[in-house]
Amino acid sequence: MLRFSVTIPAYNEERGIADILGRTLKTCASLRSEVPGVDGYEIVVVNDGSRDSTASIVGTFPGVSLIEHPTNRGYGAALKTGFAAAQGDYIGFLDADGTYPPECFPELLRTAIRTGADMVIGSRMAGMQSEMPLLRRVGNTAFALLLSWVANTRVSDTASGMRILKKESLARLRPLPDGLELTPALSTLALHEGLTVVEVPIPYAERAGRSKLNALRDGVRFVSTIVGLAEIYNPLKFFGVAGIFMLGLALLLGIGPVVHYLRYRAVPLSEIYRLLTILVLVVSGLNVLLFGIAANHVIALARGSAATDHWLARLVHVGRLKRLGLFGLVLVGAAILLNGQGIYNYLTTFRVGVHWSYMLTGVFLFLTGSHLFMISRLVRVFELLREQVRMDPASGHSERRAKDPGPKG
């Protein structure tokens, strides 16, 4: 038989805590009849340093456990305290401000048991009645699109504050922040860890009392959390896209000078600034791309596998990268041949004697070629290291295939 724990973080919630506790107690008392397999429950309120009467109100509810933070440590810190104290096989949580309906816990719990999901999210964005302000709705839609892209999985609500988790799955959901950004961190970690995530539509009400959410400040934190945690699993998706964008921009800027040269067999001096910009973009783009490739290989060594479920990972496949070394050497050779006469003149007369465009083109070819060659050698080193790890039973590594469970519902 299963036990269900509910954790409620509370900070200055005297206006809403009594109502939410009464509704949660009534809902939990009916779990035995509504959710087969559940025979017990507990409710844990974490008072996060409230300066009002929140704690004394909670104390009037028999059977509700109260944990006190002497000072305000943050929404995420309060939830983590509740998670550590919870004894249930499944842990649910919701806010104390009345925005989330505890009456939906039975449906979320039934879904968790029926599907075996590691996390069931009450989605405020899945079509049920919602009193969410327009600005927050736009922000939550943007967060969902961002996480859907980085995790390669469709998500409708990344920041929902009503969820159910398997207690045994919490060990894989680290690190978790102490602030409001804990909820998008949970979603990001769960999807990248290959946990089964299911979404269930829930209604959303206007909160009781003043909101503690700052749309701009916390929005930036949410985005930083999603991107920062995703980088731990799949840095190539970010740095690779940035590098390819720089290279693509350099290609577009280079069309004009190339067409002009093919037509007039000359490059005007006025183009030097554009060509220098192209040079910077190409070198920077290759550097950023190289970092993303290297970081993905480091993750593959540390975790046993790295994400390969998107077009960029397939584009920079190991076999293709190894072949870049030869192409890089060809470019370096072309740079030397193109400026051979100028190099000879400089060594013998200390004068270059060739047009500046030849020198600049040579620098471009040499730097590009050397970068491509180093990418190929770096990939070769990582492949050898990975092979050693794979063959060494003492290393403790095992190859892990990326999963894509995707939220359902």
Image (tube, grey):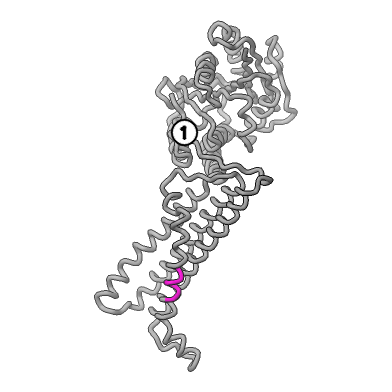
Measured from the top left, where is residue 399 in percent x and y? 56, 42
Residue 229 visible in this rendered orientation of the protein: yes
Q: Residue 364 or 44: which is nearer the viewer?
A: 364
Residue neighbourhood size for the residue with mark 1, other residues' Cα within 10 Å, grouped as few (<14), some (14–19), many (≥20): many
Specify the segment rendered in magenta: 328-333
Give me the residue at 46% from left, 71% from top.
329
Is 266 magenta? The answer is: no
Measured from the top left, where is residue 80 in percent x and y? 66, 29
Instruction: Say whether residue 103 is left or right of residue 59.
Output: left
Give me the residue at 56% from left, 36% from top.
193
- The secondary structure making up most of the magenta span is helix
Extreme residue toward the left, this view: 263
Give me the residue at 48% from left, 89% from top.
346
| Quadrant position of residue 181 | top right
Query: Which residue has dot 1 on it?
Result: 140
Q: Residue 341 or 78: which is nearer the viewer?
A: 341
Residue 101 visible in this rendered orientation of the protein: no
Position above or below: 238 against 333: above
Helix, strand or loop status at disc 1? helix
User: Which quadrant of the figure contains the C terminus?
Assistant: top left
Extreme residue toward the bottom, this view: 349
Inspect the image, locate mark 1, and give the three-letter code of the amino acid beneath it: Asn
Is 331 magenta? The answer is: yes
User: Which quadrant of the figure contains the N terminus?
Assistant: top right
Q: How many marks?
A: 1
Instruction: Say whether residue 321 is left or right of residue 25.
Output: left
Measured from the top left, where is residue 223 in percent x and y? 52, 41
Give me the residue at 63% from left, 21% from top.
7
